[in-house]
Amino acid sequence: MVYGVLGFINFAHGEVFMMGAMTGMITSNKLADAGLWDSNFIGSLALVMFGSILVSMFLAVVMERLAYRPLRGAPRLIPLITSIGVSFFIQNMSIVLFGPASKSYPRRPDWLRDKHTFLEIEGARIMVIVAAAVSMIALWYLVERTKVGKAMRAVAEDSEIAALMGIDVNKTIVKVFAVGGAFAGMAGILWGVLFGSVIHNTGFLPGIKAFSAAVVGGIGNLGGAMVGGLFIGIAESVGPLLVLEPLGVSGVSQLRDAVAFAMLIAVLLLRPSGIFGERLRAEDRT
């Protein structure tokens, strides 16, 4: 979404995700100390997610206002480098606020740790799959079926023409960052519940993989990013077992990231525009 509107990759998005997970860690532990995490897990999780979404939205909007808006007319490389600087700044800010050690979430309920269905899938993973599917549908509806989404698509197509048609470009860009921050906060909570811990660099590798998923699926294509994420997830889960293990390579589970990025390289070599093709802005096409 950010690439479609502004034309650059926001490498600090992973840190927005991390701060959402950090916020969830603090809130969930406070609720656990009060005895609410175990007695009313669903209500507590909803409260934790609401708080994380608010924090991540606020951080994303502040990031846009302070770091990216002053560079809107600059060459594309400058905001890209700025986003990397913002990423490291937020990581170090997290170290100052929360310390360098890994922080743990409270213990999950038994039904999230137990395995369900004939596929023996852990309850927490089922919850993540359902939440991801619902979030994707909600995002598609927002972008494709609402006035806010139409404004976002208009600004992504041509911001100058959109402004002439009465669309407030600055407000629309803020809304794009707010929506992105909200989904990052939700993802941070799901990460914390699934893996049980968070640290200051938690968002770095998922952020790089999110960028890789967007490239594999097609930059600026929402559906393509989702399919790209699925492809990379399948490749890093199944690839080492099918390709490396038969060759006698040991420690294949530690090579999942290498397989995922090898898939990215292969897509860039064979189909640089991604599986579904890249959606370019009007100024990029010209």
Image: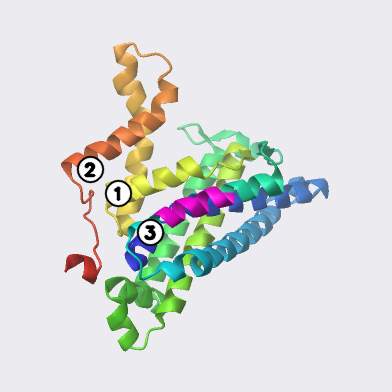
Residue 214 highlighted magenta (yes or no): no
Pointers 1 and 2 in contact (CB under 8 A)? yes
Disc 1 residue type (three-letter): Val
Instruction: Identify the mark nearer the N-term, 3 or 2.
Output: 3
Q: Which of marks 3 and 2 is in front?
A: 3
In the image, is 192 to the left or to the right of 81?
A: right
Over which residues does the magenta segment extend? 81-90
**Residue nearest the observer in this picture, 243 or 81:** 81
Using a 10 Å C-alpha cutoff, classify the residue at mark 3 as few (fewer than 14 neighbours), some (14 to 19) or many (20 or more): some
Q: Tell me the tag on residue 215.
A: 1
Residue identified by numbered label 2: 268
Taking the view exactly as shown, the residue that stands out farthest to the right is: 34
Residue 128: x and y in percent read 51, 46
Marks 1 and 3, how far apart in space? Answer: 20 Å
Residue identified by numbered label 3: 78
Q: Is the magenta stretch mostly helix, strand or loop?
A: helix
Disc 3 residue type (three-letter): Ile
